[in-house]
Image (cartoon, rainbow, N blue to C red):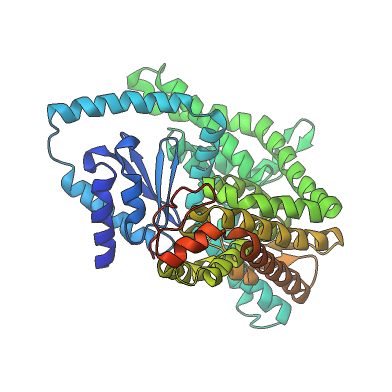
């Protein structure tokens, strides 16, 4: 494990209250996600000053340290090792009392959390673990499409198609497993019920006068089926005698949830899935430019709040139905606006060496569509550049949406990659050259508008003066910006 990862983990642990204050450790593509007994014991200012930390997000019971792609995995592993190695000591009476008080405080905070935020966080927890497979299979599907269009390697393309499509054909099962795990059920029972959705034999079942089709309802049907299975299982656990639990609980869970899936959930989820595809096509074909402007402009705030993961089921549903998601290329324009804004800050703040170092280190990830390092390390601490980056994203989204109104749809065969990394995954109703030109035009528009608006409006005189004097830059409200590190 790299030494710098161990050093970063060692620096973070005491600043979040020590091992006794850590309930859980996990990570996504860019963030170390911690469950803390008492979040108030974390020293946010000191955490932001740790080299390698790009920002913090405190959302309900989740304390998220933004480290960026590549760095977050090794740091998380080192952090877990430190917690395991140092958490075995006994707590003093004062620490036990403080922990009990923190538990009460945390419970009050959980009661005050809005149901919508809690639901979105749990929905994201179901789908985020699937992203690596979605990326890998999507890239292979894109490569296979290029080979087929070019008439190259005909002996290899059937094998590539099988490798790329296998996961998508059974994604409902993985959604079922993760749903049961997230909501407190037995994962394999969630997967067993969700597998009904994709089982070929459902073609012999008729519900509401309509013969079911394998895959009907897709990931939404699998999500609903596994969620119902979890509730049925919990109901059984409290009522079935212990001696019969091992036999009756799994049987009743699969039977009740399975029949409900066949005779209700698949039909209902299929209707919703179809509506999602129809709505997306209508939105872009009739209000494409306006829809692109709104979606591209609002996506960065969703990323900032960590709520963008809630869009994964919609993307996945569109990919299942149409072979690509038409929303992702538009949302990717938000990253283009962020890159343009960061470049403008780099040009304007010539004397802020720390900030320019941060931009140089985060820019490659930004070009590939990972916007969090630039958000938390550059634009959000400065204030206005975050807003002008949103303007750039809106302009790029409007560009792509305008062509959708003309009938030129640009989609992506997978979710996860963005920015330049999305080029191999482009798909739609036109040739690859047209798709490439439209998507590239959107990126260039986002870069240009994000740069121009930030250069003119995004950097205040106060920030310029602070950069020239070597003092910490300030946001428009006049308060010092959070510390940055490269």
Residue 17 relative to residue 392: left or right: left
**Residue 29's quadrant in the figure?**
bottom left
Q: Position of residue 73 (x, y in %)?
A: 36, 59
Q: Position of residue 278 (x, y in %)?
A: 79, 47
Q: Quadrant of the N terminus?
A: bottom left
Residue 345 relative to residue 49: left or right: right
Residue closest to the eye, 68 or 478: 478
Residue closest to the eye, 152 or 120: 120
In the image, what residue occupies the spot 58% across and 66% down? 339
Does residue 395 sit above or below 280 in this rendering? below
**Residue 238's quadrant in the figure?**
top left
Q: Quadrant of the C terminus?
A: bottom left
In the image, what residue occupies the spot 63% across and 82% down? 153
Residue 169 relative to residue 361: left or right: right
In the image, what residue occupies the spot 56% across and 69% down? 343
Residue that lies at the very extreme toward the bottom in this rendered image? 152
On the question of residue 140 being in view, the answer is no
């Amino acid at each position: 494990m790299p030494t710098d990862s161990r050093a970063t983990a060692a620096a973070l642990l005491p600043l979040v209250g020590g091992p006794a204050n850590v309930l859980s450790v996990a990570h996504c593509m860019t963030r170390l996600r911690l469950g803390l007994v008492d979040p108030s014991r974390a020293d946010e200012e000191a955490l932001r000053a740790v080299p390698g930390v790009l920002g913090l997000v405190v959302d309900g019971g989740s304390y998220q340290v933004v480290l960026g792609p590549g760095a977050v995995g090794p740091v998380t592993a080192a952090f877990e090792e430190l917690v395991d190695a140092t958490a075995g000591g006994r707590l003093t009476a004062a620490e036990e009392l403080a922990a009990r008080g923190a538990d009460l405080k945390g419970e009050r905070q959980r009661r005050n959390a809005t149901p919508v935020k809690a639901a979105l966080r749990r929905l994201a927890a179901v789908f985020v673990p699937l992203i690596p497979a979605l990326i890998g299979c999507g890239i292979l599907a894109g490569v296979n499409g290029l080979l087929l269009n070019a008439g190259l390697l005909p002996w290899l393309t059937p094998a590539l198609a099988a490798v790329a499509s296998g996961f998508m054909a059974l994604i409902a099962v993985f959604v079922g497993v993760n749903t049961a795990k997230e909501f407190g059920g037995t994962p394999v029972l969630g997967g067993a019920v969700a597998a009904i959705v994709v089982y070929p034999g459902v073609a012999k079942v008729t519900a509401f006068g309509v013969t079911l089709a394998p895959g009907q309802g897709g990931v939404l049907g699998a999500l609903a089926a596994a969620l119902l299975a979890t509730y049925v299982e919990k109901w059984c656990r409290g009522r079935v005698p212990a001696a019969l639990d091992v036999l009756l609980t799994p049987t009743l869970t699969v039977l009740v949830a399975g029949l409900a899936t066949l005779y209700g959930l698949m039909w209902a989820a299929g209707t919703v899935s179809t509506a999602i595809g129809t709505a997306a096509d209508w939105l872009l074909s009739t209000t494409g430019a306006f829809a692109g402007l709104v979606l591209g402009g609002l996506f960065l705030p969703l990323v900032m709040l960590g709520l963008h993961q809630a869009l994964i089921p919609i993307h996945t549903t569109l990919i299942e139905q149409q072979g690509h998601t038409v929303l992702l290329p538009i949302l990717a324009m938000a990253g283009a606006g962020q890159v343009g804004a960061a470049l403008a800050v780099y040009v304007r703040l010539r004397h802020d060496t720390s900030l320019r170092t941060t931009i140089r280190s985060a820019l490659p990830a930004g070009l590939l569509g990972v916007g969090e390092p630039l958000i938390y390390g550059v634009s959000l601490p400065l204030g206005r550049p975050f807003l002008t980056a949103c303007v750039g994203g809106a302009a790029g989204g409007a560009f792509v949406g305008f062509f959708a109104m003309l009938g030129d749809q640009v989609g992506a065969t997978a979710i996860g990659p963005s920015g330049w990394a999305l080029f191999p995954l482009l798909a739609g109703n036109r040739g690859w050259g047209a798709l490439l030109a439209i998507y590239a035009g959107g990126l260039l528009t986002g870069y240009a508008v994000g740069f121009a608006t930030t250069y003119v409006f995004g950097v205040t005189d106060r920030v310029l003066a602070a950069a020239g004097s070597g003092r910490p830059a300030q946001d428009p409200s006049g308060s010092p910006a959070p510390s940055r590190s490269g």
